[in-house]
Amino acid sequence: MSIGDNTAGPLLAGRGLVKAHGRTEALRGASVDLRAGEILAVTGASGSGKSTLVHCLSGIVRPDAGSVTYAGLRLEELPEKRLSELRRTDFGVVFQFGQLIPELTVLDNVALPLMLAGTDRGRARSAAGEWLERFGVRGQAELRPGEMSGGQAQRAALARALVTGPKVVFADEPTGALDSLASEQVMTALVHTAREAGTAVLLITHDAQVAAYADREVQLRDGAVAPLGVTA
Amino acid sequence: MAFMSTRHILLGLLASGPSHGYDLKRRHDERFPQARPLAYGQVYTTLQRLVRDGLAEVEGTDSDGGPERTTYRATDGGAAELSRWAGEIAPPAPFVTNEIFAKVVVSILSGGDPAAYLRAQRTAHMERMRELTTVKAAKGADLATVLSADFALNHLDADLRWMTTTAARLTTLTAEVDTA
Amino acid sequence: MTTTLHSDLRLAWQLTRGSDRREWWRITLTATGAALATGLMLAAVSLATLRGRYQVSVGAGLLNQPGTRAGVIVSLLLLLVPVLGFLGQCARIGAVHRDRRLAVLRLAGATPWQVRRIAALETGLACLLGSAVATVFSVLLLLRLWDHPTAPAWTGLALIAVGVPGLGAAAGALALRRVVTSPLGWVRRSGPRTGRGPGLLFVAGMLLLTVAALLAVAATSSGAPYRPGPPPPLMVLGAVMAVGAGAIWLSGAAARLTGRVIAARARSASTLIAAERLRDDPWAAARTHAAVLLVTVVGTGFVGVRQMLLEVLDSPRHLSENQSFYTTGLDLTAVALALALAITLSGLAVGTAESLATRRRGLAAQAAAGVPRTVLGRALLLETALPLAPAVLLSGAGGATIGFGYALFADGGGWSLPWTSLLVPPAVYAACLLAAATALPLLRRTIRPAELRYT
């Protein structure tokens, strides 16, 4: 595959990923493909290696064995600085909580990735405002993250993840701390926006109702992809 | 699905005003979008039984140039019966009868492969849940659609959780038998 | 009562033993601070019990005369200011975690008094350890220098050896008052926040110190055979106390103002993060920063006065038969100042490290989202650099005024101006940045992906 050629194969591919935390093996040869614009759910029991898989695929941690290819780039060959830059420009991340800086206003939080990319603060803030609007939390722009409800904070976090126009959004239990209605709002917002922008989403969840927002599901069991059942 | 009273649903639809059979079927399918569509013959026989029991009566007939149609309306007795039924609690799962459950039990008894069945069933369930979620999350989905999709999703989710736990139980059980 | 105390003690011990490495850091650092405080106070008290002229084998004769002895006592007590700042910073280590743990105890049915006692024991035991070590060594030293220490000296020693842990325990209980009143609020609360203005602890400490110093000075000076004008140590003490109280307020206010002004105008991500953090919690570092300001004022003033004094001593106008008496005094003061600066910088480094440790999950999430580590590191340094800049400038100006004033009016004036003193504020500022920078390697360890796990 040549560099930048992402029409033929998957946009992001993990092959035979192995990763141990101390003596426990979180991943034991997991392989996952993510196609451009696709929403993929990764499900599995707690401790099945879901989070570690996302950390490997997004270049947050380096796997002990196996490879991750993104748009023709081998992530394990990139230096840490380049990986960090990639996460800033091509990837967006949303966690269960903690990704917004508590001391910054919601608007500045969403503007931050743009400022890091060199956009001046005024323009970054107005772009951030538009994204907050899209996620229905424009009215909370000047609040601190701690002053919003959990659902609003997660929608702001999605705005922050999508503001740079990433190719892939990694969402690790984005609704883990929310009730079902707030979770529905967050997921609907994520799915609609990702589809409009053509962003691929790797969605980690233990909740089948959340996984049902995806186009496809991959189930992890003991650090590897479990075979899906065959429907007759 | 547990006992579902077509009588009472038709009575409920008549509560908003007199209506004829075809109209009732159309409105039923609209209000219960994810339910099995009502057959016209079933609407007709149910209406006749309601009249027989004094819960509904014939309002009149008109033809509007087409085939002749009989219009029905609910009686006072019908309204009372409707409100009694609507307020009555549904018995919470008095009998545990479910096809998935039965298949797993039979499969264990007959030495089949319940795990493989559960995996396949899970895939089918997820497929259906994705369909329902797409319907629910579509822009401009009306309330009835959202409510019915939600209802089905939650039940499928409950099935799934039972299947996941059962699959895990079976694994532990097999491990115990193997080590024994 | 004894049984409850016993069980509380056991619970406090179990909580400490089962806690993570950070808690041990807190204990070690708190014990070190308590040891320093005890040592300084013991030295001050031993000197304060001396009356009239003595022949003391150390200090080049500085300790022989009541007048100069009073100066030494005041300097010793002044050294307690940075030590208190350091202890205040140590108390913050793991504060969020500890508050939550004690709130959980409260929810589990502990009475407010039980929780207070357990907290008091946790801090008190650490202080007792430090104070015991310091007392043992001080007594050994004292017995070598002084053949027969007087009864008041022994009484003073005992009081301080017991008093420091007692005060530590009281401070530990006091710091918990909000946890005790609303356990639920603190269990849920996740963010660290020092809240209101200058720490009550610090103000209380300062008051205590002032009273002690006044008593000591009054007692020692009473036996003085001659009295050249107003007792200079008393004047210096008063001035420093006033500056100190102002310094706490100044550093907090400076942090808040810088935060507010810069947050609105910030162009870069790191400046924005640092400024907003300052605006959100301006008092977080006020205790250490106040100590920095005090050191700057006194240091700048001292360097100025020292230059003048040396010039006077070297000049033919001053026929001094005992130069070493003066130079030893100056050198000792310089050592004391250097010690104060070192303690203050340790407090600053501890504070910065603690601020990182408290926010480790958030920082890990930032790094995962692609915020470069350099930006996070720069924000961390700016958090120290921004509020200190105006405050150090102002306190430097204050210190320089003392030095220049002395040059203009002392000994009839006519001496060159003490320009060297102007080097002190930038040097202190640079040292502070270096101290804060020692936490940077910790940032690398802090932003591990393991912090992103929730279960």
Image (cartoon, coloured by chain):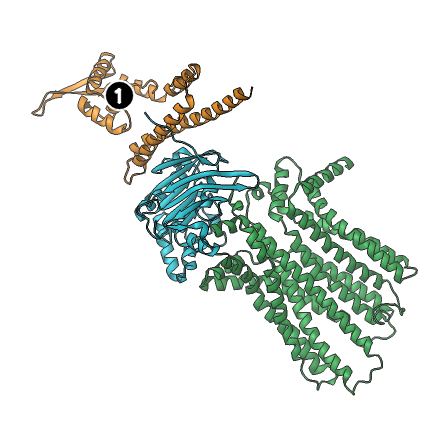
Chain colours: A cyan, B orange, C green
Q: Is residue C260 visible?
A: yes
Crowd tier of the residue under label 1, counting other residues whose Cα lies within 10 Å: few below 14, some 14–19, many 20 or above: many
User: Toward the viewer: C54 or A124?
Assistant: A124
| Residue B88 spot, x, y in % from top left | 37, 20
A149 sits to left or right of B68: right
- In the displayed orientation, state which residue is furthest to the top: B52
> Is label 1 in a helix, a strand or a loop?
helix
- In the displayed orientation, state which residue is furthest to the left: B65
Amino acid found under the numbered disc labelled 1: Leu
Q: Mark 1 points at which residue?
A: B11
- Residue A128 occupies quadrant: bottom left
- In the displayed orientation, state which residue is furthest to the right: C148
Count of numbered marks: 1
- In the displayed orientation, state which residue is furthest to the front: A1
- Residue C208 occupies quadrant: bottom right
| Residue C136 spot, x, y in % from top left | 83, 53
Q: Which residue is drawn at 31% across and 19% down?
A: B4
Q: Is residue A105 visible?
A: no
| Residue A116 spot, x, y in % from top left | 43, 58
User: Toward the viewer: C274 or C106?
Assistant: C274
Q: Residue at x 76, y 83 (%)?
A: C312
Does residue B40 lie above or below C334 as drawn?
Answer: above
Does residue C169 lie above or below B39 as drawn?
Answer: below
| Residue B171 spot, x, y in % from top left | 48, 25
User: Toward the viewer: B97 or C218?
Assistant: B97
Does residue A190 lie above or below B47 as drawn?
Answer: below
- Residue B13 occupies quadrant: top left
Q: In which quarter of the image is the N terminus of chain C?
A: top right
Identify the subunit bearing mark 1: B
